Amino acid sequence: MALSMDEQRMLAEIERRLAAEDPGLATRLSSFRRRPGPTAGLRTPRGRIILLVGMLSLIAVISVVVYVLAPLRPAKAPSTPQTAHPAVIVQGNDNAAP
């Protein structure tokens, strides 16, 4: 949430007073701002470009591997329509009188 202009002005005034009253504390607190976080590099345009190029390279490598390995798969035998259960022909009893 962005601060209003009045709030920003009041915060800047508090920071100036703190720096004037206790320079050691102000120095220690300002050192927290200088330490970038683990994702700070991705917030810069250069970091985003590097991430984008890396992702595109990964996609390209995966595509090439799939393209190269696709012909190595064994071919499937052509499927012929078959019935699930073969028909059983039941003939009459051979012992029966004609």
Image: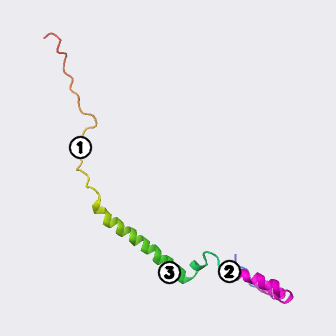
Q: Earlier in the sequence, mark 2 or mark 3?
A: 2
Of badges 1 and 2, nearer the viewer stands 2
Q: Over which residues does the magenta segment extend? A: 6-33
- The residue tagged 3 is 49
- The residue tagged 1 is 81
Q: Residues within 10 Å of mark 1 (few under 14, many from 20)?
A: few
Side of 64 relative to 45 (left or right): left
Question: Which quadrant would the C terminus be assigned to in this image?
Answer: top left
Q: Position of residue 32 (x, y in %)?
A: 72, 80
Q: Earlier in the sequence, mark 1 or mark 2?
A: 2
Mark 3–mark 1 contact, CB under 8 Å? Answer: no
Look at the magenta stretch and give its main secondary structure: helix
Side of 25 relative to 48 (left or right): right
Of badges 3 and 1, nearer the viewer stands 3
Measured along the vertical axis of the image, is residue 60 above or below residue 73?
below
Report the number of numbered marks: 3
Kindly identify the amino acid type of the residue bearing the numbered disc 3: Ile
- The residue tagged 2 is 35
Side of 50 relative to 2 (left or right): left
Q: Earlier in the sequence, mark 3 or mark 1?
A: 3
